[in-house]
């Protein structure tokens, strides 16, 4: 598997170089640097992932597993979120090499999709998991969301964002939901919320609306301590404790930090780096068939 990952990276890089020969403005030195760094980063990440996540589990023949019903689909949205931002990062890397916009988007989003879906190779050979077609589909969805807007509008009118707040659910099952705050940010789906954040000025074309103001639609879930089997979750809880998992839908405002005007290069860099996070605002929430309001939600 390690050899396959490195080979795929090498082939993609060489194909990109061949295909880009017609770009007269292409900076070949930068392309070499970016391609080399990308191959090393990708290969290293796959190797670390294998050591950290899969090493302690037995291997099996490659197989598929349908996990589409698990964790109220929070993990699937996470795949789209990761694929979306990886598409942005790789596309911007190609733009740095002076590759034209269209090719940068196509290659960046395509490679991001293949990179994310490469994880399914590890899952497919693991006896504990299995390759997931829904993971591949949601990876594709994230890359298409990014690429489609760049090709159609040359900007991101709607983007995916993330927020998190600590919950008490990890206390019942720290192995799956996190042993500490850092692990819980990644593992505890109860505290995660994914948002579709859309720029109001771009949508409405009303000039008086601040360029940074967004509306955001969020999705999360509550009372998830196992993937899908409710009875298995009960074994981690006190005998007199009952729970029912449910979905949560949010409506809120947000800010596109990259559109806040500032002359400071440091602030511009910070704003761009953290713009994947949803800015805390009051929110309307629909949960358990009840409509409520959160004073400040993150």
Image (tube, helix red, strand yellow):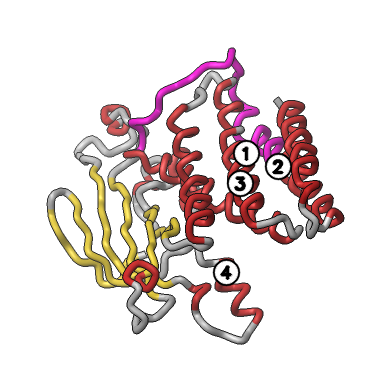
Q: Residue tagged by mark 2?
A: 42
State the CA–CA distance, disc 1 to disc 3. 14 Å
Q: Residue at x 65, y 58 (%)?
A: 92
What residue is shown with label 1? 115
| Sooner in the amino-acid sequence: mark 1 or mark 2 | 2
Q: Residue furthest right?
A: 29
- Of tags 2 and 3, the one toward the viewer is 3
Residue 67, position as x, y percentages in the image: 40, 28
Whether tag 1 and tag 2 are in contact, CB under 8 A, the answer is: yes
Q: Quadrant of the N terminus?
A: top right
**Mark 2 and mark 4: span between their CA atoms?**
23 Å
Is residue 298 placed above or below 17 in the rendered structure? Answer: below
Q: Is residue 50 above or below residue 179?
A: above
For the residue labelled by badge 3, is the local secondary structure a helix, a strand or a loop? helix
- Tell me residue 211's x, y (percent): 42, 77
State the residue position of label 4: 272
Residue under pointer 3: 106
- Residue lying furthest bottom in this view? 263
Indicate whether residue 191 is drawn in magenta. no
Front-most of residues 37 and 226: 37
Left or right, 71 with respect to 119, comes to left
Decide if residue 241 is in sight here: no
For marks 2 and 4, the one nearer the N-term is 2
Bin the neighbour count of mark 3 within 10 Å (Cα to Cα): few under 14, some 14-19, many 20 and up: some
Image quarter of residue 159: bottom left
Q: In the rendered image of this protein, does residue 86 appear above or below residue 197?
A: above
Rounded to the nearest angstrom, the CA distance separating label 1 from label 2 is 8 Å
Magenta span covers which residues? 45-71
Closer to the eye: label 1 or 3 = 3
Q: Earlier in the sequence, mark 1 or mark 4?
A: 1
**20 or 92, which lies in front?**
20
Would residue 59 be found to the left or right of residue 182 on screen? Answer: right
């Amino acid at each position: 598997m390690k050899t396959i990952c490195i080979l795929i990276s090498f082939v993609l890089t060489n194909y990109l170089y061949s295909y880009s020969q017609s770009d007269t403005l292409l900076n070949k030195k930068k392309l070499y640097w970016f391609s080399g760094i990308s191959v090393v980063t990708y290969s290293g990440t796959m190797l670390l992932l294998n050591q950290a996540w899969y090493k302690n589990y037995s291997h099996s023949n490659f197989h598929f597993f349908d996990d589409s019903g698990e964790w109220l689909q929070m993990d699937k949205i996470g795949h789209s979120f990761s694929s979306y931002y990886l598409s942005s990062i790789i596309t911007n890397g190609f733009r740095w090499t002076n590759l034209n916009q269209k090719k940068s988007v196509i290659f960046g989003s395509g490679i991001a999709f293949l990179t994310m879906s490469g994880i399914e190779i590890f899952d497919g050979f693991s006896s504990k998991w299995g390759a997931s077609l829904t993971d591949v589909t949601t990876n594709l969805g994230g890359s298409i969301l990014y690429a489609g807007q760049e090709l159609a509008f040359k900007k991101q009118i709607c983007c995916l964002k993330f927020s998190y707040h600590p919950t008490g659910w990890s206390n019942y099952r720290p192995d799956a939901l996190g042993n500490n705050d850092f692990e819980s940010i990644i593992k505890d789906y109860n505290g995660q919320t994914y948002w579709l954040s859309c720029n109001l000025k771009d949508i409405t074309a009303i000039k008086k609306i601040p360029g940074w103001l967004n509306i955001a639609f969020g999705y999360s879930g509550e009372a998830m301590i196992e993937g899908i089997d409710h009875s298995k979750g009960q074994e981690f809880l006190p005998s007199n404790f009952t729970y029912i998992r449910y979905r949560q839908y949010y409506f809120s405002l947000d800010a596109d930090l990259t559109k806040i005007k500032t002359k400071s290069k440091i602030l511009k860099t910070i704003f761009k780096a953290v713009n994947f996070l949803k800015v805390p605002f009051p929110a309307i929430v629909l949960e358990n068939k009840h409509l409520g309001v959160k004073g400040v939600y993150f």
